[in-house]
Amino acid sequence: MPRDRVHAWDLELQNVHHRLEQALEQARVSLLSGKNAKASKPDLRSHCYTFCAALGSHHRSEDDSFFPALVRQMPELRPVIERLTRDHRRLARLLADFQECLDSAQSSPERLLRKINEIKSVMNAHFADEERSLNSALHAFYAQADDRDRMLGGI
């Protein structure tokens, strides 16, 4: 594998995180726009379900493929990977709660915005921790370029 490809893993992870952050921000902007909540709810629901599926897919791919590959090559990362995996479970619970709110006719735009903000806070802290904790490891990580979608969720 060419050396520049090895170093690209940290950029791949950052790019995936950036795209997910942008998708969540689009949902926030929709809620903040002041549109009638009932009128915008179908579009918002569609966008948010897509976001939730993408974030869930990314984390499942990391848990199932990326993290085990990292630990095989660098066993000293096991405590970091365990912490990041706990974050994934927490985010999965937040996403499920958010989807329940989306499906509820009683959910106000304010409640949805609180849920989105909570997801954003936890997600951004997780992404920053993951990038910081894995940055040097990703410079030494060896995997085939065509493993990217399987390991990072194809975002």
Image (cartoon, rainbow, N blue to C red):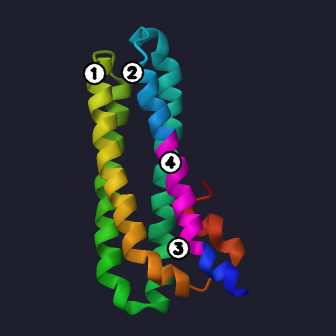
**Which quadrant of the structure image shows residue 145?**
bottom right
- For the residues bearing labels 3 and 4, Cβ distance under 8 angstroms: no
Residue 91 falls inside the magenta stretch: no
Task: Please identify, in this view, whether the residue under mark 4 or under mark 2 is nearer the observer.
Answer: 2
Q: Residue at 34% across / 68% down in the picture?
A: 84
Q: What stretch is highlighted in magenta?
A: 9-22
The residue that mark 4 highlights is 20
Task: Give the mark nearer the N terminus: 1 vs 4.
Answer: 4
- For the residues bearing labels 1 and 4, Cβ distance under 8 angstroms: no
Task: Give the mark nearer the N terminus: 3 vs 4.
Answer: 4
Q: How far apart are marks 1 and 4 (CA)?
A: 22 Å
Q: How far apart are marks 3 and 1 (CA)?
A: 37 Å
- For the residues bearing labels 3 and 1, Cβ distance under 8 angstroms: no
Q: Distance between the residues labelled 2 and 1?
A: 9 Å
Task: Please identify, in this view, whether the residue under mark 3 or under mark 2 is nearer the observer.
Answer: 2
Q: Residue at 33% across / 22% down in the picture?
A: 104
Q: Residue at 60% across / 79% down in the picture?
A: 7
Q: In the image, is residue 122 above or below residue 106? A: below
Q: How far apart are marks 4 and 2 (CA)?
A: 19 Å
The residue that mark 1 highlights is 110
Task: Name the mark on residue 65.
Answer: 3
